[in-house]
Amino acid sequence: MQMPLDVQYIIELLPILLKYLSVTMEMALLGFCFAIILAVILAVVRVFKLPLLHHLASLFISFFRGTPLLVQLFLLYYGLPQIMPILAGVDAFSAAIIGLSLHFSAYMAESIRAAILGVDKSQMEACLSIGMTRLQAMRRIILPQAARVATPSLMNYFIDMIKSTSLAFTLGVAEIMAKAQMEASSSFKYFESFLAVALIYWAVIELFSRLQHYLEIRMNRAY
Amino acid sequence: MIKVKNLSKKFADNIVLNGIDFQVSQGEIVVIIGPSGTGKSTLLRCLNFLETPSSGIIEIAGVKVDSATATATQITNLRKKSSFVFQNYSLFANKTALQNVAESLITVWKEPKSAALKHAETILQQVGLSEKIHQYPSQLSGGQQQRVGIARAMASKGEVILFDEPTSSLDPEWVDEVLAVMKQLALQKQTMIIVTHEMQFAREVANRVIFMEGGNIVEQGTPQQIFENPQHQRTKKFVARATKQSISALDSAML
């Protein structure tokens, strides 16, 4: 039986799904914050070539870029607690955030590292010449300049991360994708449900793209 | 105040500095001249450990560092005793003129931010840039950027300021304003070591001129001795050529 598109259903579904958007955004924002902290540390460790840590950072990045996010989430949530029972208490929501931040930090570390290496060497020399330590130079001069270069790609990773939170439904996190799935299977209106959830993702990401554009203009003031 | 003993620098098999010894006393203005590629800049950069010497001992204002055993802390302490003016200015691109000058006061010397900014403003006044304190480097001319560079070096509380060809990347129209600031520092008895090709400036301002070639100090003395009565053949040749150049430049400027 051919069914026409039920627009009414979509309109009614949108506010129901939107209630779960906060879960999605919470995962994305928290995940992004942790990811960026970890990524900066990984990038600085690699740029400074700190003994041992530098190799660990490379291994970490290689693993998290070399395996699918879904596999990492499953390993973390379903796998690890079997060998480390202490982790059994970690709920799906937290596991999803941890998984997302580990995964994206690996990618972001590489963008940040490239951006740091892109800052002219003379900037570091100028810092050292006035008596700053390399770490002070990083914090005050190099990272702020690298941030400007890295912002577009980091924002792209953030956008990617928002979309990737949809994988958390496989761990049982009640975010918008999970809710759409639930609504679809009870109403059998699969197309409308998934279209509704797609529209929400699209709108949110459009909003952040605008924000990205605004941020770039602001950060370029000095140049 | 500055003692350099047996300073050597090798890049792979290329010997750039060949066991340099020299001393500079408080308030002295030393100008280093010589052909390109003779290690003048490398010598200056070694004093600040921007290049790590292959061997040698550097002592500035009581901080003594042997390059064979130098630790990161020692190097930072040594750098605090000197400051550096770069050929290409190397201002912090993400900071305004004022923030550039205040940076060492805030980060290295831990002055409260408001005091540091005030202090920095006074220094920018001395180099004639009080109108430009809130401009970013990209908004300043070459001459203005280099004056900020000098102000930044003045602010960082070093006992000696090292100038690495401070006017070499400037358009001719900006050279004089930078030299004027340096002359003003000379009048204040600021200890300075200057690598430059500005022979006229060297003659006017230096207490001592060092002629370097091939990684060695060939000859040193007062400007009169070096420019009017050089002893070594190589010094004679270099000085003759360098002076002729500036005369012919003057000629062509007058035509």
Image (cartoon, coloured by chain):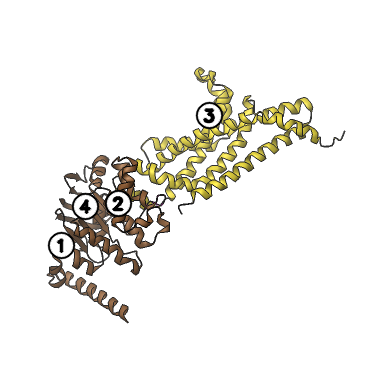
Chain colours: A yellow, B brown
In magenta, the rendered stretch is B91-95
Q: Amino acid at mark 3?
A: Ile
x and y percentages locating residue B198 in the rendered image:
25, 67
Residue under label 4: B160
Q: Do circles 1 and 2 both sit on a common chain?
A: yes
- N-term mark: 2 or 4: 2
**Camera-side residue of B43 and B76:** B76
- Please indicate whether residue B207 sits to the left or right of residue A67 in the image: left
Task: Characterize the local packing of mark 3: few (<14), some (14-19) or many (20 or more) Cα atoms within 10 angstroms.
Answer: many
At numbered mark 4, what does the secondary structure look like: helix, strand or loop? strand
Cα distance in 3D space between marks 2 and 3: 50 Å
- Mark 2 or 4: in front is 2
* Disc marking residue B122: 2
Mark 1 and mark 3 residues within 8 Å of each other at the beta carbon: no
x and y percentages locating residue B64 in the rendered image:
18, 45
Cα distance in 3D space between marks 3 and 4: 51 Å
Residue located at (28% from left, 59% from top): B164
- N-term mark: 1 or 2: 2
